Image (tube, rainbow, N blue to C red):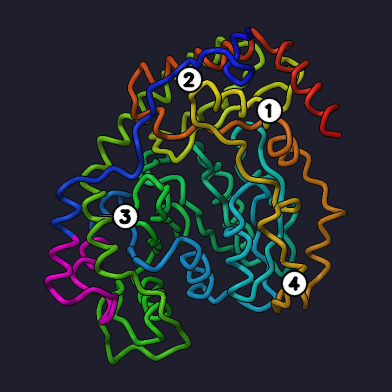
Amino acid sequence: MSDLAILGGPKTRTEPYPAWPVWDERDLQAVTEVIRSGRWGGYPYPGPKTAELARRFAELQGGGYAVPMVNGTVTMEVALRAAGIGWGDEVIVPAYTFQATASAPMAAGAIPVIVDIDPNNYCLDPRAAEKAITPRTKAILPVHLGHQMADMDAIMALAERHNLVVIEDCAHAHGAKWRGRGAGTIGHFGSFSLQSSKTLTSGEGGILLCRTPELAAKAASIIDCGRPHALGGGPEDDSQEYQVGGNFRLSELQAALALVGLERFPEQARQREAMAAYMDEALSEIPGVRVLPRDERHTTRSFYRYIFAIDPAEFGVEHDVFCAALEAEGVDCWVGYEAMHRYRLFQPQTSRLAVPNAFPQYFDFQNMHLPEAERACQREAVWLDEAIFRAGRQGVDDAAAAIKKIRQHAEELRKAAQAFREQTS
């Protein structure tokens, strides 16, 4: 019998990794308090729990004016609208990210311009972004991906030279820091998700960090049906003008859950960061594994997933088969997103949405060439679940042992995968 679990051998790890989300009596008490208050929703905005969440989240990230809202996609749309970016404006986005990063500009009437990634961190490549700038370019939307941060020095310098707005997509970067500055406080806006799988969650929800109180007031108005808001996102102020908006408010129930999550977050983040450094060491010893290097300017790593790359030539298979083998060993993992121009979840040209129909030339995916994103998405990227890093050294040791085991039996796995393809072709 094979040693590989996927071929009938014993698992490397039989104990499940820690569950997510974490909850206890504090969550029940927080939700019960809101239910008993009778103030469950988001109106009038902000409710007391939502206002407290805004204050405490800005403290966690080290600055900005926080506007909680319904999810981490709307946050990006609202940022663009608050910055005055709309119909026909171009917004540069990376090719390797969740579809929301590209769909949010379209919701604001803008055009997502997809550029390639830096192979060292899988984040937006500033050099590719600069080549994509035209007179219509108004914003850059860099994504801090997995456990990496985009090169914010280069991106902010580029934005300053071309007078561009920077909206950091920080859905994976709660608590992360660049040169000691919190993710989301470096650009003009920082967009955060509170969706169920995120490392700070309220089930659904999002928070937009704004550089100035004026931008926060405009964002608060947009998500509160256009009602005027005071500077800093406070309650209605008659000195502010009404504008076009919608109901994108965060509910008090979700804010209550997020506040409890904030209490746990610092210790969870410390666990992940310590174990990520330990994982860096463990993986660096395995032939065929490429650890994405940590930029010394990325001073605090607080992450959603840990990403590394395999060399398919060394393992005899590409990352989809590798991940299936690793899952069979009891280690939670994923191949990650598809490249944006090959993404089944991003199909603007099949819709009747205004932007792709008015500007079809931007969505000619068959003629897009994004080699770094394609290599990562189709062949080499492996995403490890954050739970591994809350399981202490044993959790990391087990994951590393499973990867070593797969490497040692790479030829056997290659032959089995080839035989399976031949049988099913």
Of 250 and 95, nearer the camera is: 250
Q: Is residue 94 above or below residue 352?
A: above
Q: Position of residue 368 (x, y in %)?
A: 82, 52
Q: Is residue 418 above or below residue 40?
A: above
Callout 4 amino acid: Pro
Q: Nearer the viewer, mark 1 or mark 4?
A: 1
* Residue 34 on the magenta span: yes
The answer to whether 173 appears left or right of 315 in the picture is left
Callout 1 amino acid: Val
SS at mark 1 in the image: helix
Identify the disc placed on residue 63: 3
Q: Nearer the viewer, mark 1 or mark 3?
A: 1
Q: Position of residue 280 (x, y in %)?
A: 49, 20
- Which residue range is magenta in the image? 31-53
* N-terminal label among 3 and 2: 3
* N-terminal label among 1 and 3: 3
Identify the disc placed on residue 399: 2
Which residue sits at x=25%, y=52%?
Answer: 59
Between the residue at mark 1 and the residue at mark 4, the CA separation in whole angstroms equals 35 Å
Label 1 with label 4: CB-CB less than 8 Å: no
Identify the disc placed on residue 356: 4
Which quarter shows the C terminus?
Answer: top right
Of 409 and 343, nearer the camera is: 409
* N-terminal label among 1 and 2: 1
Between the residue at mark 1 and the residue at mark 2, the CA separation in whole angstroms equals 16 Å
